[in-house]
Image (tube, rainbow, N blue to C red):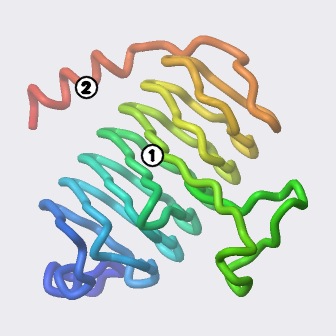
Amino acid sequence: MSTSFLSEEEVAKIGFKSYGKNIQISKNAQFYLADKISLGNNVRVDDFCILSGQIILHDNVHISAYASLFSSSESLIEMCDFSSISTKSSIIAQSDTFDGTYMTNPTVLEKCRKVLQSKIMIEKFALIGAHSCVLRASIAEGTAIGAMSLVIKETEPWSIYAGSPAQKIAERKKDILDNWALYYKNS
């Protein structure tokens, strides 16, 4: 049977810091600093994703095609249980200072740059919509980020955000929690 996902042996060769059971990694995904990446159980990373730096993906996490997570050895991205990132979205835990006081890009001497770094937490049941960007900000439990949004500030739990920059537009229902209980009862 042909599949577009790596075999367990191929996953082991990537050199992750750790990984759990039922991992689905696309053959077309790329990992940089894989020894700093930890994967829980039931994690799926689709085609053409890039994961770089210190990253922790807990259980039942999905990263859709063309999504990217950029961290470093000094910053961290952590995705909690049942969180997901939709296609072509980016989570960026580090970036150059753009105010003109320093030079930018990795080809410049380090002493001429100022890189801003942070820890990004994407809490349980959070969802980031397609073509969105999360820039050095955490996403609270149960928060949904609408498509094509730019998140630059912390969010409130169980809320819906959209826009550029993202603004709270509604409360989000918590019916997910009933399904979560059912999921564990039947698994």
* Amino acid type at mark 1: Ser
Please tell me the numbered disc located at residue 152. none
x and y percentages locating residue 167 in the rendered image: 75, 24
In the image, residue 10 above or below residue 50: below
- Give the mark nearer the N terminus: 2 vs 1: 1
> On the image, which quarter does residue 98 sit in?
bottom right
Please tell me the numbered disc located at residue 180. 2
- Distance of mark 2 from mark 1, alpha carbons? 15 Å
x and y percentages locating residue 25 in the rendered image: 33, 72
x and y percentages locating residue 31 in the rendered image: 41, 78
* Amino acid type at mark 2: Trp
116 or 110, nearer to the observer: 110
Which residue is at a point 46% across and 56% down the rendered structure image?
75
SS at mark 1?
A: strand
x and y percentages locating residue 54 in the rendered image: 38, 62
> On the image, which quarter does residue 102 sit in?
bottom right
SS at mark 2?
A: helix
Residue that mark 1 sits on: 84
